[in-house]
């Protein structure tokens, strides 16, 4: 809903490009710190103190980490604010060709920059809460961001700003306000958990040296997907409209990545860390296999659906207001390519905790660096090759990003196998091919049914009719996929009932 409103207001013009870059830089740090990368180092160390020395020792360690994080990122934020005109030549070098776009991007990034500091502190508190089994507050921070940005967009529409610089400024202010609200939410959650942290002056300690040694490689390794996207944004800035088109495509395929991959990774890390400390290796193996099975059972059909009907999805979600049919064609093409890399990005989130729980962040960092290098070189080469051939150059960025994801996932998996730390059990060997077949059956049903609903999916039908038609396709795909999964006993009705029962129990609790 947030991005539907942004697309209708900003489209994919120069203001949209400027806002995407302004949002991308602090949002990159949100992803690096908030979605498992920073916590890959912090959570095992915090949990070790919590279980071995008690809550007071764990709180003291968290306060030391908070002090360093706050003062380092405060300094980084101040430096970035002061040097933003020069920094923009790095973030979006192609904007220099259009001075008004460049200047607006500088202004908007200065407005959104404090979000970096707020979200990094939120990440630390989220890791502490996750370690004591509290996930509600950390899971709600994205809701706060989305609501704040939606309110900003509605205010912009109410005033009458559409696709103009003023709309971009209001949207950037929405990001700023969201950061303050997210920080307040996590401070409240910490207070409820009895883990209120006090800000102290940073000091060097063995714990902080260990956190730094694990944290820097962990941030690079855990954030490789986001670094790939950031590099793509830098390259795409040389093509008008490409930055925002990549953004809209990214938002759609990030939905299953966030729901499945990041959620599995965040929960799996403390789970595997506890099992390793207890010496329960069979439980570690089972957790890894079931996590991969569950993730692929949800991710593969999502990737296939995004690849076979991207035009219909983008058209229904975004094509209105400032977002044109040409924008739909370009965004859908990028989305289809991104979808091919979606399973790999989720696998990275499943495989990484096996390293992080063992306090090995250097191996994933090396593989992330290899993937990042391959993606950067591939993006640059394919961007200019496709542009020379008169094709959409942003497709080259999407291709390189997806291939980079598969390279990283493969390196992580085969190293775990070589070390004897990830054994594929018979159930997973049986079910993965069946999940793929079920997804192919679903794709066939969607390809047959989509032409029958073509008129109802068109913008002239109105958003409600479009949504109903797209919803009917989703239900059809879900029904075909579920029938195949149940018929082949990838999941039984009894297993499905137990899963739903646990979810209801957790919700009532």
Image (tube, rainbow, N blue to C red):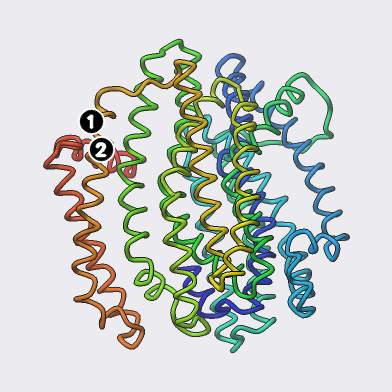
In the picture, measured across the screen, residue 98 lies left or right of residue 488, that is right
Instruction: Say if mark 2 contacts mark 1, CB within 8 Å.
Output: yes
Residue 255 numbered tag = none
What is the quadrant of residue 37 in the picture? top right
- Which residue is the site of mark 2? 433
Q: Position of residue 344 (x, y in %)?
A: 45, 43
Give the residue at the far top of this rendering. Answer: 279
Quadrant into which the C terminus falls: top left
Q: Position of residue 427 (x, y in %)?
A: 24, 27
Residue 187 in view here: no
Residue 377, compared with residue 363, is above or below; it is below
Which element is circle 2 on?
A: helix
In the picture, measured across the screen, residue 114 lies left or right of residue 122, that is right
Quadrant into which the N terminus falls: bottom left
- Which residue is the site of mark 1? 430
Q: Residue at x 63, y 29 (%)?
A: 41
In the picture, measured across the screen, residue 176 lies left or right of residue 432, that is right
Q: Position of residue 442 (x, y in %)?
A: 22, 55
As rendered, which of 357 and 417 lies closer to the eye? 417
As rendered, which of 97 and 101 lies closer to the eye? 97
Residue 153, compared with residue 197, is above or below; it is below
């Amino acid at each position: 809903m947030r991005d539907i409103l942004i697309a209708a207001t900003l489209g994919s013009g120069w203001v949209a490009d400027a806002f995407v870059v302004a949002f991308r830089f602090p949002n990159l740090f949100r992803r690096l710190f908030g979605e498992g990368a920073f916590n890959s180092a912090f959570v095992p160390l915090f949990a070790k103190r919590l279980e071995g020395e008690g809550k007071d020792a764990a709180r003291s360690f968290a306060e030391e980490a908070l002090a360093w994080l706050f003062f380092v990122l405060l300094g980084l934020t101040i430096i970035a604010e002061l040097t933003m005109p020069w920094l923009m030549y790095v973030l979006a070098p192609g904007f220099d060709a259009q001075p008004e776009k460049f200047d607006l991007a500088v202004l908007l990034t200065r407005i959104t920059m404090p979000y970096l500091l707020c979200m990094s502190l939120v990440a630390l508190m989220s890791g502490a809460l996750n370690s004591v089994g509290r996930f509600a507050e950390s899971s709600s921070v994205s809701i706060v961001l989305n609501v704040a940005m939606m309110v900003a967009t509605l205010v912009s529409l109410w005033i009458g700003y559409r696709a103009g610089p003023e709309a971009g400024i209001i949207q950037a202010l929405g990001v700023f306000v969201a950061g303050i609200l997210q920080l307040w939410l996590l401070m409240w959650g910490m207070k409820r958990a009895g883990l209120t942290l006090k800000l102290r002056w940073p000091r060097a300690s063995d714990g902080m040296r260990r956190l730094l040694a694990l944290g820097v490689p962990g941030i690079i390794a855990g954030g490789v997907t986001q670094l790939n996207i950031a590099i793509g944004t830098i390259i795409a800035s040389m093509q008008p409209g490409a930055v925002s088109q990549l953004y809209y495509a990214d938002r759609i395929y990030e939905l299953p990545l966030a729901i499945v991959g990041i959620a599995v990774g965040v929960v799996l890390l403390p789970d595997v860390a506890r099992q390793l400390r207890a010496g329960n290796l069979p439980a570690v193996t089972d957790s890894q296999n079931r996590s991969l099975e569950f993730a692929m059972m949800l991710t593969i059909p999502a990737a296939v659906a995004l690849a076979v009907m991207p035009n219909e999805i983008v058209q229904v979600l975004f094509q209105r207001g400032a977002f044109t049919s040409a924008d739909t064609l370009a965004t859908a093409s990028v989305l289809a390519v991104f979808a091919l890399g979606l399973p790999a990005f989720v696998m990275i989130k499943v495989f990484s905790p096996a390293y992080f729980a063992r306090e090995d962040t250097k191996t994933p960092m090396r593989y992330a660096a290899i993937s990042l290098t391959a993606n950067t070189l591939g993006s640059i080469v394919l961007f200019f090759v496709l542009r020379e051939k008169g094709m959409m150059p942003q497709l080259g960025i999407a291709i390189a990003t997806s291939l980079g994801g598969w390279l990283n996932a493969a390196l992580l998996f085969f190293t775990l196998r070589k070390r004897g730390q990830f054994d594929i059990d018979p159930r997973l060997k049986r079910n993965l091919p069946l999940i793929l077949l079920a997804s192919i059956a679903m794709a066939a049903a969607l390809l047959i049914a989509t032409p029958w609903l073509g008129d109802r999916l068109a913008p002239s039908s109105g958003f409600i009719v479009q949504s109903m038609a797209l919803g009917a396709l989703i239900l059809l795909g879900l029904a075909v996929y579920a029938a195949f999964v149940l018929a082949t006993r990838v999941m039984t009705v009894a297993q499905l009932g137990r899963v739903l029962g646990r979810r209801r129990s957790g919700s009532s609790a």
